Image: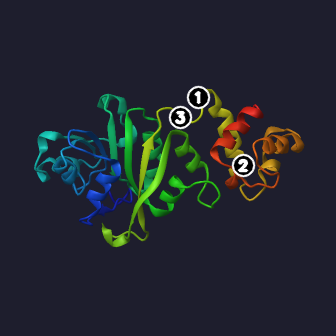
Amino acid sequence: MAARLSQHFLKDPEAPDAIIQAAGVGPGEAVLEIGPGKGALTKPLLDAGANVTAVEMDDALAAGLPALVKNPERLTVINEDFLRLDLDALGPGPWRVVGNLPYAVATPILQKVLTWERWTQAALMFQKEVALRVASGTGGADYGLLSLSVRLRADAEIAFELPPEAFRPRPKVDSAVVRLTRLAAPRLPPQDEPAFWRLAKAAFGQRRKTAAGVLARALSRPRAEVAAALAVAGVGPRARPEEIPFEVWAALARSLHA
C-alpha cells in the first residue's frame, strides 16, 4: 500500500526534530500525525511530550506502531484513510499537524487540512516541486491555484529541504517541509469564494495570456471594463495571472461581480 501511494519512509535522524520545531510542538500538545509509517516521527513527537493521534491506513503498520514507541499511553492510532476520516470527531484541539505525506495524495490531504478549523500550525512534507507551489508568492511559475487555495486560509513557507537519501525507498526527487500557520479567519468571506475561484480558474487555465483578455472572455464583459477594474486594483492591462496577488484577485471578484 505504501508503494501504491508513493510513500517514502523518513530515515534522516535529524529531520524529525526539525519537523517538530517547524510545527511548534511542545509538551502536552495535541498532535495529529498523518501517515506515521514505521514511527520515525512518532517516537520523537512522544519524546517531546506531545499527545499523538496517528492516522495510518496500512493495516500492518497501524497495528505495529504502538510496540515501536516508549510512551504508547500518549499515542492513539487510527487505522483509516485520512481522506475518509471525520476530523471533527478527533476532538476540539487545538491541534498541531505533522506528516511525511505520500506524494500521490499530498495535495488532497493538504486541502482537507486547510478547510478544517481546529488546527493552529502544521509542518508537512511534500515533493519539493509541490512544496514550492504550496508556499509560492506572487510572480513566479510556481504561483497558481494551489498557492491561492493555501493563502486563502493560511500563511506558508518552506521550512527546510531534504535530499532523496533522507528516505527509504529513495525517491527520484527532492522533498521539502512546508510550515503552515492557520489564519483566525479566511482572507475572503465565504460568499465571495465562488466568484474568486471562477476568475482565478479562468485566468490560470490560460496563464500564458494576459489576465484582462482571458477574464473578459470568461465573464462575457468588454475588455475595457475588465482592464479598468485591473487598473483600479493597480494592475496593468498586460499583466499575466501569476503577476496578480491574492488580494487583487479578491478585489476583482468583488468589483466585477463574477
Using the image as rendered, state which of residue 196 and residue 47 is in the foreground. Answer: 47
Residue situated in front as seen by the camera: 169 or 253: 253
Quarter holding residue 126: bottom left
**Residue named by callout 1:** 190
Residue at image coords 65%, 42%: 247
Closer to viewer: mark 2 or mark 3: 3
- Tell me which amino acid carries mark 2: Ala
Q: Is residue 25 above or below residue 130?
A: above
**Percent x, y of residue 90:** 30, 32
The image quarter containing residue 221 is: top right
Residue at left offset 16%, top offset 50%:
47
Distance, label 2 to label 3, CA atoms, is 22 Å
Mark 2 vs mark 1, foreground winner is: 1
> Residue 203: which numbered mark, if any?
2
Cβ atoms at labels 1 and 3 below 8 Å apart: yes
Residue for badge 3: 186
Q: Is residue 244 left or right of residue 162?
A: right
Image position, residue 114 (x, y; %)? 46, 40
Q: Which of marks 2 and 3 is nearer the N terminus?
A: 3
Spatial CA span between label 1 and label 3: 8 Å
